[in-house]
């Protein structure tokens, strides 16, 4: 074989081998690569609303109450019905219904010898119906009865009646008859009163007759101890010669057990001019512009007589104790002021001072004098600023923290007495003690008005009058 063929075959072999190597390299499986990052998917969770809370279960509530006559005498042996339940009053006029889950509102009736003496609709006797607990308002439709309530009164009723009363206590003040007033009688007469107490508010409903045109309005209020305690927000509307007024006691005001004075009045100034013009057209014989209807009143009772007596006893004890403390403080201040003024007048005159000492049986507060006979200011300041005034202020703070008092006059008089006593100490010290010794007034005795004589007379009169006014609350 010649050398050319040998060279050709060698080239072909090398090329073939290279081709096989290249094929194997191309067929090698590549290294797996990580997938490209993809946006993370947001997990969607469906929000499930919690089920609505179940309405509170209707409670079983007990009812206690009293039935009283026109003179506030207990009415014994009378039948009282609360819806379908019936009981009889005892010798004290007391009645009770055991705890039960009653309808929200019931009709309360009073019978004597089978005859209906009084009937009251819409009396709160239980919690709201479960399906109505979350509903708007709680005002019932106006009942058909002898003394209809105005639509405005029922609207107010829904806003003022608590959803869940803390307790139920009723006092029924009834009259033997329910005849409309005659032409010769009073134009307005209060016949009945129903006091509903819920523990977190109360309602007093007054019923009566009025010889007034249909649509006339009667204003009603109740007084206690000479002060107007509560008044109807909406006047009662006359319909068929009858009216029924609702007086609500706010939940933060306590309706104390006791005797109240219910009052009712009518005034054309409270009526719409168009209404008065219509009356003038229908009743021209009446001088409506000059018409004056005297205010009428009737005593009513609310609550429990034993509770009334206990509260009165506690009130007497409290005011007797505080009046005694104030009198002691007044004497302590006045005795020192009087002796200091006398010391100042006899300063430097030993004979005159001895004469005064003998006539008075000695001095009690000579320690307030300095060695040379002047005022020992440090001791006087210690008495006023460290001892006496803090005691008066402590009594004021204690009295102010008591909150609502049963007797508003007593509360106001004691507060006024303590304030006047504190004020008079500034007048005494600033305008009498310091000038008597020729000293400049002390900064702790600042008093805004410098009319010494007028202010002192006014303050001493206030102190005297308040002591006198408090006397009847301490006995």
Image (cartoon, rainbow, N blue to C red):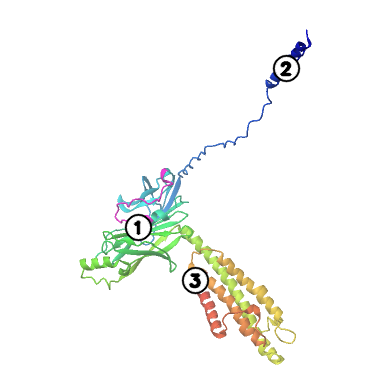
Looking at the rendered image, the disc whose residue lies closer to the viewer, 2 or 3, is: 2
Q: Is residue 80 visible?
A: no
Q: Which mark is residue 472?
A: 3
Tell which circle, 1 or 3, labels the residue nearer the N-terminal end: 1
Q: For residue 153: magenta?
A: yes
Q: Which residue in the protein does label 1 denote?
A: 152
x then y, percent, for residue 108: 36, 50
Q: Label 2 to label 3, Cα distance in Å?
A: 138 Å
Magenta segment: 131-155
Judging by the rendered image, the residue that carries numbered circle 2 is 15
Task: Tell me if 233 is positioned left or right of 14 in this view.
Answer: left
Query: For this rendering, which residue is in front, 47 or 410?
Result: 47
Q: Is residue 474 left or right of residue 109?
A: right
Residue depicted at 54% across the width and 77% down the height: 463
Image check: 399 left or right of 6? Answer: left
| Tag 2 secondary structure | helix
């Amino acid at each position: 074989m010649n050398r050319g063929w040998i060279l050709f075959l060698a080239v072909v072999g090398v090329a073939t081998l290279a081709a096989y190597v290249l094929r194997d390299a191309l067929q090698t499986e590549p290294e797996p690569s990580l997938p490209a990052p993809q946006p993370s998917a947001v997990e969607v969770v469906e929000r499930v609303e919690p089920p609505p809370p179940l309405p509170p279960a209707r409670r079983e509530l007990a009812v206690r109450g009293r039935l009283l006559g026109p003179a506030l005498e207990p009415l014994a042996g009378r039948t009282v019905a609360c819806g379908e339940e019936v009981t009889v009053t005892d010798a004290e006029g007391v009645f009770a219904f055991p705890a039960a889950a009653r309808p929200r509102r019931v009709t309360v009736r009073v019978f004597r010898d089978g005859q209906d003496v009084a009937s009251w609709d819409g009396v709160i006797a239980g919690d709201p119906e479960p399906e109505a607990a979350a509903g708007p308002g709680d005002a019932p439709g106006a009942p058909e009865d002898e003394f209809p309530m105005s639509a405005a009164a029922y609207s107010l009723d829904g806003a003022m009646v608590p959803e869940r009363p803390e307790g139920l206590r009723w006092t029924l003040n009834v009259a033997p008859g329910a005849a409309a007033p005659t032409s010769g009688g009073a134009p307005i007469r209060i016949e009945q009163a129903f006091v509903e107490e819920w523990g977190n508010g109360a309602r007093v409903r007054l019923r009566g007759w009025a010889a007034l045109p249909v649509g006339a309005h009667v204003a009603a209020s109740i007084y206690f101890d000479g002060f107007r305690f509560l008044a109807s927000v909406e006047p009662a509307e006359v319909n068929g010669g009858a009216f029924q007024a609702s007086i609500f006691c706010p939940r933060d005001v306590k309706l104390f057990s006791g005797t109240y004075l219910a009052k009712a009045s009518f005034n054309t100034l409270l009526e719409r001019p168009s209404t008065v013009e219509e009356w003038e057209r229908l009743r021209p014989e009446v001088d409506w512009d000059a018409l004056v209807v005297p205010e009428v009143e009737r005593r009513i009772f609310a609550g429990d007589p034993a509770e009334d007596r206990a509260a009165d006893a506690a009130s007497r004890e409290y005011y007797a104790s505080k009046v005694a403390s104030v009198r002691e403080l007044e004497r302590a201040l006045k005795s020192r002021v009087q002796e200091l003024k006398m010391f100042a007048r006899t300063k430097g005159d030993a004979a005159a001072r001895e004469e005064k000492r003998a006539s008075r049986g000695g001095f009690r507060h000579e320690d307030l004098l300095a060695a040379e006979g002047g005022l020992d200011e440090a001791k006087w300041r210690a008495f006023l600023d460290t001892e006496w005034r803090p005691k008066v202020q402590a009594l004021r703070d204690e009295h102010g923290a008591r909150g609502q008092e049963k007797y508003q006059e007593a509360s106001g008089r004691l507060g006024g007495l303590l304030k006047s006593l504190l004020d008079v100490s500034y007048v005494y010290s600033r305008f009498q003690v310091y000038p008597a010794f020729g000293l400049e007034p002390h900064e702790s005795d600042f008093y805004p008005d410098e009319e010494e004589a007028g202010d002192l007379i006014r303050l001493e009169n206030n102190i005297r009058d308040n002591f006198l006014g408090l006397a009847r609350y301490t006995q």
